[in-house]
Amino acid sequence: MNEREPDERERREAEALARALEGDGTAEDIPQDTLQAAALLRRTAGEGDLPADRRRAILEQIAPEPADRPARRGRLRWLVPAGTAVVLALVVAVWGFGQLTSRKVAPAPEPVRLPSPALELLASQARAASGSSRDLAFLGESMRSYRRTLYDALAERYPERS
């Protein structure tokens, strides 16, 4: 590596840091950031631990013993309304389902009995299949008559609504 040589100011600060780490020197001749660095290094090295009684006092201040803590009723406080809401929702769902299934529904209407085609219509269809134009004209007349009968039966069963 190509590191440069430390200048005079850096040397003075390094010496002050060494004195601070050893506990020598006064606060006036040591820069503030050097003192903070020394305290940090001491703390991470395991030196400067708090006495046991001071540690206990701070710990009690931060996290009191379980007996000193107020009773935790947070879960119970929310459990009762939440449980009530769930039960109420189930009651409404069951009641609503019961209402849907107990509705009176109109019985299904009887299917319409459509009139059967006359034997004459079936015979004219068979003749028209041969291709004669006279037979086709007769089939048209027979179909008109059957359609009228069919539409009358449907109109009787399903009257028009106004």
Image: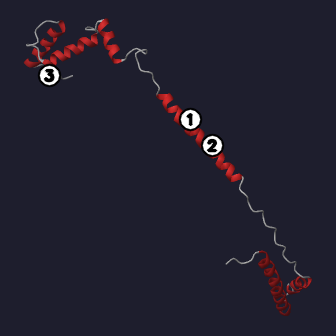
Seen from the viewer's position, the closer of residues 140 and 110 is: 110
| Residue located 11% across and 12% down the image | 27
Identify the residue position indicated by label 1 in the image: 83
Mark identifier at residue 156: none
User: How many C-alpha atoms fall within 10 Å of the one at disc 3: few (<14), some, or many (≥20)?
Assistant: few
Which sits in the foreground, 15 or 47?
47
Nearer the N terminus, badge 1 or badge 2?
A: 1
- The x and y percentages for residue 108 are 78, 64
Q: In which quadrant will I find the C terminus?
A: bottom right
Q: Secondary structure at mark 1?
A: helix
Mark on residue 4?
3
Residue 145: give x, y in percent of width and height: 83, 87
Secondary structure under tag 2 reads helix
- Nearest to N terminus: mark 2 or mark 3: 3
Image spot of residue 86 (x, y percent):
57, 39
123 in relation to 37, above or below: below
Image x and y of residue 148, in percent = 80, 84
- Direction from residue 161 to residue 35 in the image, left or right: left
User: To which quarter of the image does residue 136 belong?
Assistant: bottom right
* Three-letter amino acid code at the position of disc 3: Arg
User: How far apart are labels 1 and 2 at the CA level?
Assistant: 12 Å
